[in-house]
């Protein structure tokens, strides 16, 4: 055995204990989930949620949110103000609130502060915002005094100032927090998306009827965002462009500080839309939804049996069959909820399931009995979903029995990647023989696959899964991607997916946009998990090619061209890029295929309802929404002449 010891030392001196701000800055993802744009939004919502908590406890009616030109954030509420003064150990309470983990009023167990039904991060949220900000200023007003503290990257700078507050001032209580997200942490950028933030504020307004958000985004005029009817306004907004089949079911109940508000409608679409909240924090799923689904399934079956709408030989309607066309808003409150992660995506408190089920079952039974037309509409919709699933299942079984040569188990047009590490592989969906040919030549055969499609694929908004699978391109993509069809549904099993990225590659013109929309409609309707989990991308080919001597540079759009013209002093030749089918392999490699030089846009579903509205308007059967969209957006179109 060799006596050479080249191993690294590992001893007591290598063990570190991270506390407070240092821990958050070193591992920010553990506290806010992401250091991308979602993380910037999260640290902003942590401050806004404090104002909502004050509203929930009857102390706040106004919250001002201002996003400055340099992306600084200014949030003011007229709640009670954050307590300040010396703690038992002589430290300043206001500083502790923003620097010491698990310090706050959200651990109260008897409800006297109200914060045990709050939506913050249980003594972590505001500290995460402070820790991950370049600067963070707080001013709290209460009891005739104002206390001010200034922080930089989570560390207190200067002295805490406490001063008398004039009784003549309009605001006698409340909190103001100003901060700038730290670009060292958020390397993808610190700009908050206007549309996304506005939608979130509108959601919070629906959940907090009477609370007014005064929202100013950079140079845009100030907007007052509020709702008087709460989630009843919300559900009307969600279904405003859909054909609604039922009246609105609304119920609210609270027992022993556990409460639920529910609004439900059915429409004639094939999708289900859920907006779930726990203590005003949005969730993607959880035990509260399980409780509601159980109550709905039980009560609809009891009603259907009692009224002869299900025959004795018929099996019970399932929760899966009740999903199609369902729009549900569920706002749940409880002390000390338990979530599956720090960002509270999924509620895991076991008592939530039994509480929601019990609190809503009676209300659903009464509503069905009082609204027989609505109950029958829901039952008919569920039975139609059952028939469609059975039809699709039979179609899939027929396909499986077909001759292997006639079936696209692995489509013959697919030029696959050779790597066994499928997560590193990516597939490019390309329309047209010419573009497919260049893409195949330009690709890295180890990790890049090419799947050519012939023309525009089927518009699946007008088709169920059975009809969609009769389209060769769609059936081929289902198999190529590693998707499965079970019980009439497309199943996304990440362990069986054949690619880590699925890239739609189309020209930057009207036809290309249509092809992208058709592809994304297919994914959105039948396999939305691929979007939600970050597998779907769109290639962004450049619009311009700049040549300066032997140097070639590609520019993605008009804005990039304008910026280039401002900064260059040398003469150059400007060429407008051709379509993908006219690119040679070297151009295709540099602008579309090479990870070092290409631009890909990840397709997300931060707001599935807005995505649904867009697809239904542009790809649905009704022409009126399309005409309205075209008339409102014609001035934004890029027209090739």
Image: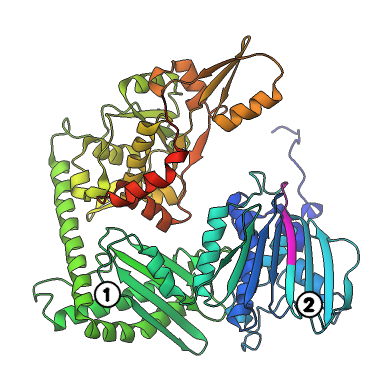
| Residue furthest right as drawn | 159
Quadrant placement of the N terminus: top right
Task: Give whichever of 612, 489 is nearer the camera.
Answer: 612
Total labels: the figure holds 2
Q: Dot 2, crowdedness within 10 Å: few (<14), some or many (≥20)?
A: many
Q: Which residue is mark 2?
A: 141
Tell me the tag on residue 416.
Answer: none
Q: Residue at x 80, y 85 (%)?
A: 143
Helix, strand, or loop for circle 2? Answer: strand
Q: Quadrant of residue 330?
A: bottom left
- Packing grade of label 1 (10 A; few <14, some 14-19, many >=20) is some
Judged from this view, the residue extending furthest toward the top is: 549
Nearest to viewer (mark 1 / mark 2): 2
> What secondary structure is found at the residue carrying circle 1?
helix
- Residue 398 horizontal side relative to residue 154, left or right: left
Side of 153 where 439 appears, left or right? left
The residue that label 1 is drawn on is: 297
Q: Position of residue 270 (x, y in %)?
A: 27, 58
The spot of residue 320 in percent (x, y) is 27, 64
Residue under the point 48% across and 54% down = 606
Magenta segment's dominant SS is: strand
């Amino acid at each position: 055995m060799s006596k050479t010891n080249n191993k690294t030392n590992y001893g007591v001196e290598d063990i570190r204990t991270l506390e407070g701000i240092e821990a958050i800055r070193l591992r920010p993802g553990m506290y806010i989930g992401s250091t991308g744009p979602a993380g910037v939004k999260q640290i902003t919502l942590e401050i806004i949620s404090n104002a909502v908590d004050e509203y929930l406890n009857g102390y706040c009616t106004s919250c001002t949110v201002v996003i400055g030109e340099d992306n600084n954030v200014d949030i003011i509420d007229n709640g009670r103000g954050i307590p300040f003064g010396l703690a038992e150990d002589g430290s300043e309470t206001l500083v502790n609130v923003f620097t010491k983990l698990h310090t706050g009023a959200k651990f109260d167990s008897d409800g006297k502060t109200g914060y045990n039904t709050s939506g913050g991060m249980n003594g972590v949220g505001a500290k995460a915002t402070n820790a991950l900000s370049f600067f963070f200023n707080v001013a709290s007003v209460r009891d005739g005094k104002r206390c001010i503290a200034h922080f930089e990257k989570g560390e207190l700078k200067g002295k805490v100032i406490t001063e008398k507050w004039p009784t003549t001032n309009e605001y006698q209580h409340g909190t103001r927090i100003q901060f700038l997200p730290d670009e060292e942490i958020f390397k993808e950028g610190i700009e908050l998306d206007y549309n996304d933030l506005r939608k979130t504020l509108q959601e919070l307004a629906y959940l907090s009827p009477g609370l007014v958000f005064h929202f100013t985004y950079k140079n845009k005029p100030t907007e007052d965002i509020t709702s008087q009817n709460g989630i009843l306004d919300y559900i009307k907004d969600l279904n405003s462009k859909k054909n609604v089949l039922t009246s609105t079911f609304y119920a609210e109940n609270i027992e022993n500080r556990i409460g639920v508000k529910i609004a439900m409608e059915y429409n004639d679409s094939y999708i289900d839309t859920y907006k779930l909240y726990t203590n005003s924090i949005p969730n993607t799923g959880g035990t509260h939804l399980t409780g509601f689904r159980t109550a709905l399934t039980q009560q609809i079956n009891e009603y259907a049996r009692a009224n002869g709408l299900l025959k004795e030989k018929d099996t019970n309607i399932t929760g899966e069959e009740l999903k199609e066309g369902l729009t549900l808003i569920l706002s749940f409150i409880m002390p000390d909820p338990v979530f599956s992660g720090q960002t509270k995506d999924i509620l895991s408190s076991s008592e939530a399931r039994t509480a929601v089920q019990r609190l809503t079952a009676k209300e659903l039974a009464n509503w069905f009995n009082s609204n027989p037309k609505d109950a029958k509409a829901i039952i008919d919709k569920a039975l139609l979903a059952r028939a469609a699933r059975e039809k699709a299942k039979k179609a899939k079984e027929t396909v499986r029995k077909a001759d292997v040569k006639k079936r696209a188990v692995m489509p013959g047009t697919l030029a696959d990647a050779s790597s066994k590490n499928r997560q590193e592989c990516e597939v490019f969906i390309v329309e047209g023989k010419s573009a497919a040919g260049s893409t195949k030549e330009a690709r890295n055969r180890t990790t890049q696959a090419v799947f050519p499609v012939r023309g525009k694929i089927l518009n699946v908004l007008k088709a169920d899964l059975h009809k969609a699978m009769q389209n060769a391109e769609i059936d081929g993509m289902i198999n190529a991607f590693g998707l499965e069809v079970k019980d009439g549904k497309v199943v996304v099993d990440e362990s069986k997916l054949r690619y880590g990225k699925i890239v739609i590659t189309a020209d930057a013109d009207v036809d290309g946009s249509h092809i992208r929309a058709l592809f994304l409609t297919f994914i959105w309707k039948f396999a939305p998990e691929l979007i939600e989990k970050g597998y779907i991308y769109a290639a962004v080919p450049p619009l311009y090619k700049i040549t300066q001597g032997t140097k070639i540079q590609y520019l993605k759009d008009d804005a990039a061209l304008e910026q280039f013209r401002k900064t260059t002093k040398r003469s150059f030749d400007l060429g407008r890029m051709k379509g993908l089918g006219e690119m040679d392999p070297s151009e295709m490699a540099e602008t579309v295929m090479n990870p070092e030089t290409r631009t890909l846009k990840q397709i997300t579903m931060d707001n599935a309802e807005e995505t649904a509205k867009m697809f239904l308007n542009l790809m649905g059967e009704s022409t009126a929404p399309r005409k309205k969209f075209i008339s409102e957006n014609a001035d934004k179109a890029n027209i090739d002449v």
